[in-house]
Amino acid sequence: ASAPLLSACEEGVGAILSGVSDAGAGAGAGPVAVSEEIFLPMEKIRSLNPLNSKDEDSFFINSLIYDSLFELDDSLAASGSLAESWSYGEDGLSLSIRLLGGALWEDGEPLDAGDVAFSVNCYSSYPESHLFYRNVANIRNVRTDRSDPLMLTIDFKSADGAGVELLTFPVLPSHLYRNPSDLNSRVGGFVPVGSGPYRVAEFDAYTHVTLEGSPSYRGGTPTNRLVFEMMPFRDDALNMLDIDAISYAVSKAYDRDAIYRNPSVNVTNFISNEAVWIGYNFGKEAMRDMAFRQAVALAIDNEELLETCFFKSGVVGDSIYYPGFLGVGGAYDPYPFDLGAAKSRFAEAGLADQDQDGLLEYFASDGEGGGLWTAISPELLVDGDETARVAAAGLIQASLARAGLDCRVKALAGEEYLKALEERDFDMYMGGGRFSDSYDLRPLLHSAWDNPVAYVDSVLDPLLDSFARPCAPEERRRLFQEIHAVMTERIPYYCLMYKTYAAVSSPSFRGSVDPSFRNIYRACEGWTREISAP
């Protein structure tokens, strides 16, 4: 049966309550106790099988059950998880990994290199049916060493995209399945067997999933239980925090502050991998002028956009790369709002004083030493289905007008917006989306990748290519410092904001809240609830 929603169940209270104490009890309050049962919301999931699931909740739950070769820290730099040590061949086409000794599956079987080879074979056998097909797309094969079960070598198809940052897929147990097809056939009712800190204690596909600590986990066994309750609408969970029916929930909504108003709930905002930006069409002469792009950036008040259009649910970004990526840069605007500086930069771009119609004029050479003045009124394309972005486009239009530039907003919905992007039928556009963990942004920036803004940069292209190949962490950081410097100065895309999500915990919740967009339940091993003792 499903775990209770509101409070500790009356039967078996001793199993989940401990530490009854009068400490901290106010006037009229009774003794308190610690419950190690944490209630969490989830939407209906089709499967907990990493090989055939694309559900976001499955991804986060499985991150507690399975371990991976590598993990990413807060700056998205890779470090070993199951991988103890590793080195690349000279050509970057092979990666030798030694696994940690003593890692066990929850059933007590040892985890070894054969499990990694089996996992890659599974994910490669069913491309695009799961969340990890991009992680293994560049892997040719995995070789194991019969004399050493902890050694393996991964051979890549290309050194391009062979970084350890992609080796973050769940490692699967080979001893339980005959072949990839055997595992892929397990969908409804599938109960995972992993090597992570938690294991499945109860699973009902229609009501709940309960996790308990795995006694085989090398990092120690968590003592709490995580009860994931099925809810058709995720934001309903925010209304249930007040009454302790839910202990912890994450909201991505811009207007989430309007949903939870109880000052007793605890809110921790964290940066997502979801950004909103302005892109420029480099097929248009004015857009190719760096001074023009810098002037536009200076004329935009990002803090006002965050306050007025995005409900304060974001931070400014120094580029479209993740703020603080690899320890470089951070959540700041390299072009802080300054209308006077914007006007000066427009002048540097060849934009003259306003004409009789109030429009700035652009000086374009005729190629014979002369030129002509042309009024410029750039068009800002925005997705009409994105209410917050449409509002932001209106503010940007008004701010550019104050700097002397007439900008027209063109709002197109759905397919029409995408078609205009594909055909580059815009001067500037407001776009947005989530980035992959590796932050290989060549599809947006590299001239050979037919990027959406027709950007060509002979300095940036080789840097992006080198960044996508295997290299030592210090070299990877150095390369990104150079990329960051180019992006900051030339701003082919101007980052308006990085969206934040909110981790909201109930008044009775106790423990460290340290979520990331990759692991919203990070630090959950120490979570408990303080409730009234029976």
Image (cartoon, rainbow, N blue to C red):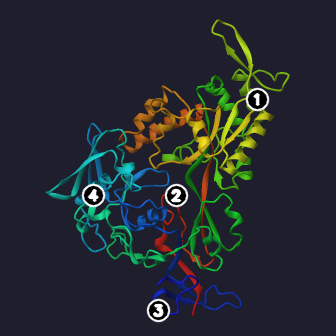
Judging by the rendered image, the residue that carries numbered circle 3 is 12
Sooner in the amino-acid sequence: mark 3 or mark 4: 3
Judging by the rendered image, the residue that carries numbered circle 2 is 517
| Position of residue 443 measured from the top left corner of the image (x, y, whole percent) | 48, 38
Judging by the rendered image, the residue that carries numbered circle 4 is 116
Judging by the rendered image, the residue that carries numbered circle 1 is 343
> From the image, which quarter does the C terminus lie in?
bottom right
The crowd level at tag 3 (other Cα within 10 Å; few <14, some 14-19, many 20+) is: few
Query: For the residues marked 1 and 2, what is the alpha-carbon distance in whole angstroms?
Result: 38 Å
Q: Are marks 2 and 3 in contact (CB under 8 Å)?
A: no
Q: Secondary structure at mark 4?
A: helix
Q: Residue at x 56, y 51 (%)?
A: 274
Sooner in the amino-acid sequence: mark 4 or mark 1: 4
318 in relation to 508, above or below: above
The crowd level at tag 1 (other Cα within 10 Å; few <14, some 14-19, many 20+) is: many
143 in relation to 236, above or below: above
